[in-house]
Image (cartoon, coloured by chain):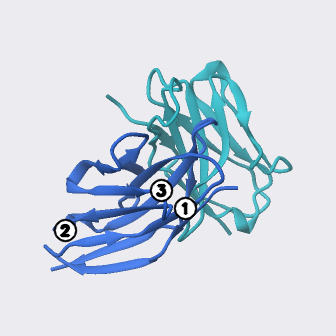
Chain colours: A blue, B cyan
Amino acid sequence: AQSVTQLDSQVPVFEEAPVELRCNYSSSVSVYLFWYVQYPNQGLQLLLKYLSGSTLVKGINGFEAEFNKSQTSFHLRKPSVHISDTAEYFCAVSERNQGGKLIFGQGTELSVKP
Amino acid sequence: EAGVVQSPRYKIIEKKQPVAFWCNPISGHNTLYWYLQNLGQGPELLIRYENEEAVDDSQLPKDRFSAERLKGVDSTLKIQPAELGDSAVYLCASSLGRVRGETQYFGPGTRLLVL
């Protein structure tokens, strides 16, 4: 069975500082990896995804993530955050040999302070 | 292009009452998903449709929950009767349904409160 662990439930950071949101997964088969962002009272929006190829993936809003197979991690990073990045961030996986069922982590609340 | 549309956005009901949620996916998207998101948690899949066929409903509590996707477009999720523990956000998502790993597009959700 697959599982996703987001190691930090809350991450407070000052504006223009760098940030890393950590995600580890467990699966007995190969997976696709995703990061979604959820702003208050809105649905989830895809930030980026890893399907294959280069392990460094660039997404929208200046975010990037790196797939590390040996450590089963897919950490999300941004070199300089803005107030508008304040939101909930979800890491998710889906099995490569199955349909699109996403298994989500519990989320990390990013709070950017001025 | 319009995104995934859900209604109502908010619903407050008494326990034991029935409730229904409606979802209109992005035009041309063959795959439709219903997820349940409890407070402080990530979404969990309830049911997945490929066109009008439910291909994964293993997580749907069938004693009180039902869903349908007539004509392979809009979908309705129903709870009857509702329980206090059903208070949550119900998210609908859709995708093209052509390749693995494709992006799922989410609606804004229906926030249900059962009193």
Give the residue at mark 1: A25
Residue B49: give x, y in percent of width and height: 65, 31
A45 and B108: which is toward the camera: A45
Residue B30: give x, y in percent of width and height: 55, 24
Q: Looking at the rendered structure, which numbered label has been put on residue A8?
A: none
Quadrant showing the C terminus of chain B: bottom right
Q: Residue at x 35, y 31 (%)?
A: B2
Type of the residue with mark 3? Lys
Q: Is residue B64 above or below residue B5?
A: below
Type of the residue with mark 2? Val
| Disc 3 chain ID | A
Q: Is residue A42 visible?
A: no
| Disc 2 chain ID | A
Q: Looking at the rendered structure, which numbered label has been put on residue A81?
A: 2
Q: Is residue B54 above or below residue B8?
A: above
Residue at mark 2 shares a chain with residue at mark 1 = yes
Q: Is residue A64 visible?
A: yes
Q: Nearer the viewer, mark 2 or mark 1?
A: 1
- Check if mark 3's residue and mark 2's residue have beta carbons within 8 Å: no
- Mark 2: few/some/many CA within 10 Å (<14, 14-19, 20+): many
| Disc 1 chain ID | A
Q: Residue at x 50, y 61 (%)?
A: A72
Image side of residue A63 versus residue B101, left or right: left
Of pointers 1 and 3, the one earlier in the residue sequence: 1
Q: Residue at x 47, y 50 (%)?
A: A33
Residue B48: give x, y in percent of width and height: 65, 37
Q: Looking at the rendered structure, which numbered label has been put on residue A69?
A: 3
Quadrant of residue A37 within the rendered picture: bottom left
Q: Nearer the viewer, mark 3 or mark 2?
A: 3
Q: Residue at x 86, y 50 (%)?
A: B63
Q: SS class of the residue under badge 1?
A: strand
Q: Nearer the viewer, mark 1 or mark 3?
A: 3
